[in-house]
Image (tube, helix red, strand yellow):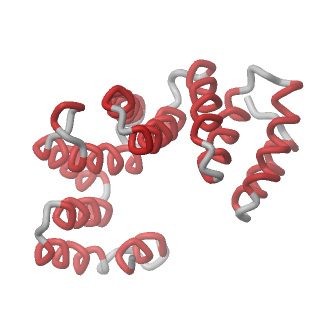
Amino acid sequence: AQAGAPLDTAEQLYQQGHFAEAADTLQTAARSDPNNAALHYWLGRCYFELRNYDQASTNAEKAVRLSAQNSDYHLWLARIYGRLADARHSLWLGMKTRKEFELAVELGPKNIPARRDLAEFYTQAPWIVGGSRKKAQEQIAAIAALDPVQGALARAEFDRQTGDSAAAETQYQQGLQGDPSRPDDFYVIAD
């Protein structure tokens, strides 16, 4: 369920980069509709962009409680936990991050951003919180099966993070053969 006009307005503000204004709009709407998961999801995203990770996690956790089967809600909660884990050097939050990424993939097997983030987590995280290059490669293979260009980009990121810049370049070149109507792929390659 969505909150109609306030949610639409907040999403437009968010897309324009007006995160504080979007958060104000969402806070007002959430006071009158506190059980609307979408409002809390977008509040979590706004606070994430504002680098207020405590407020972001509070709202993202509420969104997940209200709509536990939503893959994107778990994905964003994992991203927020990841930032908190980095800031606090917390193994416990690192494990929570992994759990949420895995839930996002379990709930949305075709959710490529969730799979990409999970692969990145597996690549970067220490083994004590669940890091595993083998598991990262499994996610990359699943991504490639869904979308070859996204698979090439995920592989390139893995190669870059593991120090194989020549292999990463090859994968990025392969990604350049993608669909020009999807410019985001090209922005990733350029970056």
Quarter-of-image position of residue 43: top right
Q: Kindly identify the residue that appears in the image at 58 percent across and 19 percent down.
A: 65
Residue in front for this viewpoint, 181 or 3: 3
> Which quarter of the figure has residue 132?
top left
Residue found at x 20% / y 59% = 158
Q: Looking at the picture, does residue 156 appear above or below residue 133?
A: below
- Identify the residue at image location x=81%, y=29%: 30
Q: Nearer the viewer, residue 48 or 35?
A: 48
Does 149 sit above or below residue 146?
below
Q: How many marks?
A: 0
Q: Determine whether, in the image, residue 97 is placed left or right of residue 58.
A: left
- Split into 4 quadrants, where in the image is the N terminus? top right
Residue at (77% x, 52% y) in the render:
20
**Quarter of the rendering occupied by the C terminus:** bottom left
- Residue 46 as seen in the image, left or right of residue 170: right
Left or right of 57: which side holds 161? left
Residue 112 image point, x, y percent = 38, 49
Farthest-out residue, front: 88
Residue 58 percent coordinates (x, y): 62, 28
Q: Nearer the viewer, residue 76 or 115?
A: 76
Residue 191 vs 71, above or below: the answer is below
* Residue 173 image-quadrant placement: bottom left
Residue 24: image x %, image y %?
Answer: 83, 44
Image location of residue 50, percent across then percent down: 65, 52
